Image (tube, helix red, strand yellow):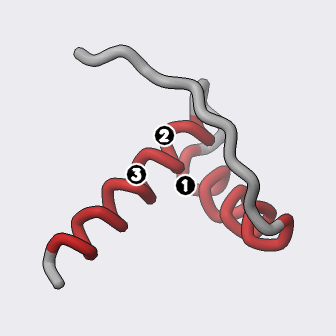
Amino acid sequence: MTKNRRVTISINNDIDLNFRKLASNKMLFKTGWYSKAIEEAMLLWMEKESNL
């Protein structure tokens, strides 16, 4: 398993709030839920972009 990397990003507050609402409902606030949701979103984006 690879080591996790800590990153700092800046995004629109409204986008973050909406993402957190959706992600927390799906991930049920389990430990690391936000990181897992961001990782899933990144993987989906990479998959979509590589299919263009």
Q: Looking at the picture, tell me which residue is in the foreground, 38 or 6.
A: 6
- At x 57%, y 25%, the residue is 6
Measured along the vertical axis of the image, is residue 48 above or below residue 21?
below
Q: Which image quadrant for residue 44?
A: bottom left
Query: Label for residue 36?
Result: 2
Q: Looking at the picture, tell me which residue is in the foreground, 47 or 17.
A: 47
- At x 55%, y 46%, the residue is 27
Q: Are marks 2 and 3 in contact (CB under 8 Å)?
A: yes
Name the N-terminal-most of marks 3 and 1: 1
Q: Are marks 3 and 1 in contact (CB under 8 Å)?
A: no
Mark 1 or 2: the one toward you = 2
Measured along the vertical axis of the image, is residue 42 above or below residue 33?
below
- At x 29%, y 63%, the residue is 46
Q: Residue furthest left?
A: 51
Mark 3 or 1: the one toward you = 3
In the rendered structure, the answer to whether residue 18 lies left or right of residue 7 reads: right
Circle 1 residue: 26
Circle 3 residue: 40
- At x 55%, y 37%, the residue is 35
Amino acid found under the numbered disc labelled 3 = Glu
Amino acid found under the numbered disc labelled 1 = Lys
Q: CA distance from mark 3 to mark 1?
A: 12 Å
